Amino acid sequence: MSSTEQGTSSAAPAEPTTAPESAAAPEVPESFYYVHGKDKVVHKVSAGALQHSALIHGMISNLGYTEEQAKANPFPFENIDGDILQMVVDWCNQHKGKPTPPEDTNLPKQKEKLFDLVLAVNYLEIKELLTYCCKQVAMMVKGKSPEEIREIWMIPTDAEDEAAEKEAKKRAGKEAAGETAAAAGDAK
Amino acid sequence: MVSLLDMPDVPMNSILDHGGPSVIFSLRKVCKNLRDYIDETMPELHLDAINICLEYKKITITWSHYLENVQISYKLHGNGYKTVFGENEITIENVDYMEGFWNDYSLIMKYQKSSLKRFHLHLSNSTDVEDVSKFLEQYQNSGTIKTQYLDLGIYHGDEVLVILQHLNANCLKNIRFFSASYYDKNIDFTEIVKLDQWKNANEFSSRNLSIDASMKHFTHFSKINAEFQHIYSEPGNLNVLKEVCIFEKKIV
């Protein structure tokens, strides 16, 4: 997996450990930023790796943080699970400054993880990774009958959907009637 | 719980884009929500070629796409029809096989916005006059097809005009007629040569057919590969051809 190091989990931004030293020191020191997901584990990521994310890249450009400010204000992504953010950070690190290959075979095979990854990557606007993920979802659908797709992706049939909708309406009607009766009782 | 219905628009469109036509049509059949979404976004199919082959009580459509080649057959089965798609077979009751084909074909052509490179229509293998008439009637009611190349396996020859009329005259560049049988096939070129589809095309070829028409109607092509039944003695017939070859250097 990736060389990204994690800080400890805490409500306040945790002190992240340093990123690994590269063999040859770059002429211009690379700037780093900090991100955390739902689990509050802070990831230190280079600006180069974060360039893959149009969202974070835009935030960095607008804020103009110094190293100290960046450390004190990690970007919070509360809508992204920690393990998913870790995957995203790993991918950005692995593909930092490199042309992206036509295929990526290291994506999660489980549909739940892949789905969460798609949502995260879509939110973070990482175009290439989103394409890989969507290709993988498309391959999971390809060759399957509509029944199989329904089963895999938990999609109700139109009849089931209608029945559930009717049931929900009925329940809402009953609840409303109950509330009215209770209100009338209180008034007496 | 993960549901494909919760997928935001950007990734959903990317999934449709990277899955190819078979994924689009499979998802469309899953539920109303997906059907409505696909019908609203109208993803482009980018098909390269469509091949339709009419046989006895059976129609087969094959499409070529950079991601897949798909073949679906619609066969008469009892009082309905059976579709065969790879290893999958589905039987539909109380619907005519041709109606089943046209429903799916209309859907394909609704999403295919770009021009096809090739459109193959083989009526030659059909032996049922009534079915060919029904097919042509439906064909006339369907939309114009954008294709650069028409490969037409003719049935009687009368259908050529109808087929050509429903092709986009600005796209069509190459026309090929052929016959699968050795019986005489008569193509009446009187009306065909007046069509823009004919006039705008660059190349013409025919196989197993003997053309009975004046050569002056063929001089606008840059390439011809055809057998002519007669060299008419009408004034300027061969001269027209000679002049085009010498002065315009068009014909290869």
Image: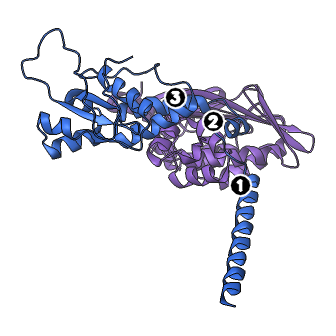
Chain colours: A blue, B purple
Name the N-terminal-most of marks 1 and 3. 3
Disc 3, SS: helix
Quadrant that contains the N terminus of chain B: top right
Front disc: 1 or 2: 1
- In which chain is the residue bearing label 3? A
* Position above or below: B188 against B86: below
Mark carried by residue A161: 1
- The residue lying toward the viewer, choosing from A48 and B14, is A48
Query: Which amino acid type is marked by label 1?
Result: Asp
* The furthest residue to the right: B78
Mark 1 closeness class: few <14, some 14–19, many ≥20 residues within 10 Å: some
The chain to which mark 2 is attached is: B
Question: Do the residues indicated by labels 1 and 3 lie within the same chain of the protein?
Answer: yes
Amino acid type, mark 3? Gln
Residue in view at x 56 percent, y 34 percent? A112
Residue A5 percent location from the top left of the image: 30, 22
CA separation in Å, label 3 and label 2 = 55 Å
**Near-viewer residue (B152 or A38):** A38
* Amino acid type of the residue that numbered disc 2 sits on in the rendered structure: Asp
Residue A8 at x, y = what percent? 33, 29
- What number is the disc on residue B212? 2
